[in-house]
């Protein structure tokens, strides 16, 4: 199997992850509905598990330097399930940023090269925020302009 082709299990995992993100967004839009957030969390976690597989998921979540993010992420999920959706969502989001914050510059670079989304990153406030999150210093931006 090629490195860039997804098997059936990974395709199901992508679908579950997308549905989990959709349910989570709906839960936030509907004033932190606990049921939608809980279903979104369960779908997202099971989808990531199917995409990565057990061994890679274990190595991602249980690294020593990412233990704080893992505890906050899963603690937030438990708070959402046990009827504290607002507090749980924010704790979970903080844990998510601790876990996956290293990937954020890569996501920004990919988004800047996406046809429709790249126009959004050219807006004045968003451009500075994205440059800050991407880690570009003013000297690097001046060198890129030359």
Image: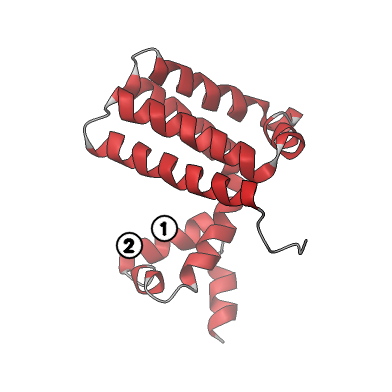
Spatial CA span between label 1 and label 2: 6 Å
Identified at 54% across, 77% down, the residue is 142
Direction from residue 52 to residue 93 in the image, left or right: left
Residue that extends furthest to the front in the rendered view of this protein: 8
Of 131 and 94, nearer the camera is: 94
Relative vertical location of residue 15 with respect to residue 69 in this rendering, above or below: below
Badge 2: residue crowd in 10 Å (few <14, some 14–19, many ≥20) = few
Of 118 and 33, nearer the camera is: 33
- Whether residue 40 is visible to the viewer of this picture, yes or no, is yes
Direction from residue 117 to residue 97 in the image, left or right: right
Which image quadrant for residue 23?
Answer: top left
Residue 76 x/y as whole percent: 46, 22
Relative vertical location of residue 50 with respect to residue 2 in this rendering, above or below: above
Relative vertical location of residue 43 with respect to residue 135 in this rendering, above or below: above
* SS for callout 2: helix
* SS for callout 1: helix
Residue 70 x/y as whole percent: 61, 27
Q: Residue under label 1, please give it.
A: 129
Identified at 55% across, 53% down, the residue is 104
Q: Residue under label 2, please give it.
A: 125
Identified at 69% across, 36% down, the residue is 57
- Whether residue 135 is visible to the viewer of this picture, yes or no, is no
Which image quadrant for residue 38?
Answer: top left
Residue that extends furthest to the left in the rendered view of this protein: 30
Which image quadrant for residue 100?
Answer: top right
Quadrant where the N terminus sits is bottom right
Direction from residue 60 to residue 111 in the image, left or right: left
Residue 128 x/y as whole percent: 41, 63
Q: How many labels were placed on the picture? A: 2
Say if mark 1 contacts mark 2, CB within 8 Å: yes
Relative vertical location of residue 141 with respect to residue 91 in this rendering, above or below: below
Badge 1: residue crowd in 10 Å (few <14, some 14–19, many ≥20) = few
């Amino acid at each position: 199997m090629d490195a860039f082709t997804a098997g059936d299990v990974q395709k199901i995992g992508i679908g579950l992850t997308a549905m989990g993100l959709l349910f989570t967004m709906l839960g936030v839009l509907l004033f932190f509905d606990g049921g939608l957030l809980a279903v979104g969390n369960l779908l997202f976690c099971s989808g990531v598990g199917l995409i990565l597989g057990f061994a890679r998921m274990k190595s991602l979540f249980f690294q020593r330097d990412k233990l704080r993010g893992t505890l906050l992420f899963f603690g937030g999920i438990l708070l959402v399930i046990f009827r504290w959706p607002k507090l749980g969502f924010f704790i979970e989001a903080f844990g998510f940023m601790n876990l996956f914050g290293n990937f954020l510059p890569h996501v920004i670079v990919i988004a800047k090269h996406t046809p429709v989304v790249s126009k959004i990153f050219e807006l004045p406030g968003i451009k500075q925020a994205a440059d800050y999150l991407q880690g570009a210093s003013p000297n690097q931006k001046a060198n890129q302009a030359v």
